[in-house]
Image (cartoon, rainbow, N blue to C red):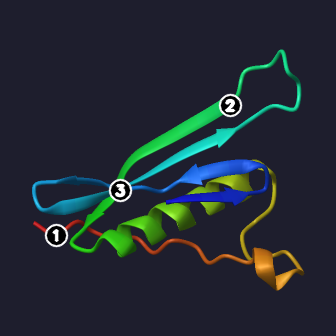
Amino acid sequence: MEYEYRGWVIDATPDFSLGQFFAHARLIRASSDDDADAEMHIERNLAWFDNEEEAIQVARKWAIAWIDARSGNIAGTDTDSSTRHSTIPARTPAK
C-alpha cells in the first residue's frame, strides 16, 4: 500500500514469509530540483503479524512518526486534526 504524506511516498507493503506478514516501511521523497537524486529511507522488519492489514498499519504509522520527527514535528502536536497521529505501540514478536 502506498500513501503520500508531507512530500514523501510511503510504501507500507509487508513481506510474507513463514506464515507471517513482516511490516516494512519504504519512504521516498523526490526533490523539486531536477539535478538532485530522490531521497530514500527503508526500515525493515519493524514487527511481524498474522494479519496483513495490521502489518500495513504499523508500517504506515511508523513512517508517519519518522517523517514527523525528522521534520521537527512531534506527532499529535499539530492543530489540524487531519495530521495527528498516535505513536506506535511496542510489540513483542510471538514465538
Q: Check residue 39 in the rendering and tell me which mark sits there, or answer none.
A: 2
Residue at 35% over, 56% down: 14
Measured along the vertical axis of the image, is residue 69 above or below residue 94?
A: above
Q: Secondary structure at mark 3?
A: loop
Query: Identity of the amino acid at label 1?
Result: Ala
Relative to the observer, which residue lies in front, 13 or 40? 13
Sequence-wise first label, 2 or 1: 2
Query: Identity of the amino acid at label 2?
Result: Glu
Query: Identity of the amino acid at label 3?
Result: Pro
Find disc 1 in the rendering and name its residue. 94
Measured along the vertical axis of the image, is residue 83 above or below residue 74?
A: below
Q: Position of residue 91 (x, y in %)?
A: 33, 71
Labels 2, 1: front one: 2
Instruction: Indicate the quadrant where residue 56 lies.
Output: bottom left
Measured along the vertical axis of the image, is residue 41 above or below residue 73?
A: above
Relative to the observer, which residue lies in front, 14 or 42? 14
Instruction: Indicate the quadrant where residue 95 lies.
Output: bottom left
Find disc 3 in the rendering and name its residue. 14
What's the CA distance linking mark 2 and mark 1? 34 Å
